[in-house]
Image: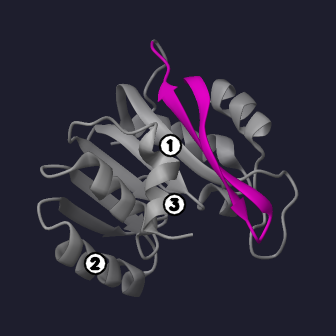
Amino acid sequence: MDHTDHVALLRGGVPTEPGTWADLGAGTGAFTLALADLLGPGAVIYAVDWDRVALRRLERERHARFPATTLHVIEADFSQPLPLPPLDGIVLANSLHFVRDKEPVLGLVRGYLRPGGRLLLVEYDTDRGNPWVPYPLAYPTWAALAARCGFSGTRLLATRPSRFLGRIYAAASERAAGVASGRIG
């Protein structure tokens, strides 16, 4: 996959106006850069990853390609509480499949979102993992989990073939109204 594919996967879930978003498990930032492209100048993005080298590479790429986007990098494990402001949206792209016990993490994620904020999940469309992708979730599994974790309006945005596990998908969900934030700190 390339930048065009990353943008296409997220496009249907990202509003046209800039906002404040986070990419949790950003790595070198393929989806962070797609988000910057879609949100446009004035966007603020928090990229969270435990890999300092990957985050530095992302900072260089963002500066070269999307200088009007503000990027904050946080070297941390996204499955733990994070110092984030209220967010308009969050991207979890190829990162949630590293988490075995997803519900507590999704509780944190929901708590970072403003009411009506969006969660975009990019994941392999299978429930069978391997050593490199240990805990993926097929879209129907994600839709059920999202509802249990206080997200509503879950919908499939796009799919792309994957040579690794058959197919990758992007889905959008919103923080359900009336669900306590669970925000820490």
From the viewer's perspective, is the residue at label 2 or at label 3 nearer? 3
Kindly identify which residue carries mark 1: 120
Q: Are marks 2 and 3 in contact (CB under 8 Å)?
A: no
Q: What secondary structure is the magenta-colored segment mainly? A: strand
Q: Label 2, label 3: how many angstroms apart (C-alpha)?
A: 17 Å
Residue indicated by mark 3 = 5
The Cα–Cα distance between marks 3 and 1, rounded to whole angstroms, is 15 Å
Which residue type does callout 2 highlight?
Glu
* Residue shown at 60% from the left, 61% from the top: 94
Amino acid type at mark 1: Leu
Q: In the rendering, which numbered label is found on residue 61?
A: 2
- How far across and how far down the image is residue 140, in percent? 78, 34
SS of the residue under disc 2? helix
Residue at 18% x, 75% y: name it: 63
Examine the rendering and report whether any part of residue 172 can be seen.
yes
Are the two marked residues, 1 and 2, in contact with CB atoms closer than 8 angstroms? no
Q: Earlier in the sequence, mark 3 or mark 1?
A: 3
Which percent across, then down, holds residue 15?
32, 35
In the rendered view, tell whether residue 136 sits above or below residue 151: below
Report the span colored magenta.
151-177
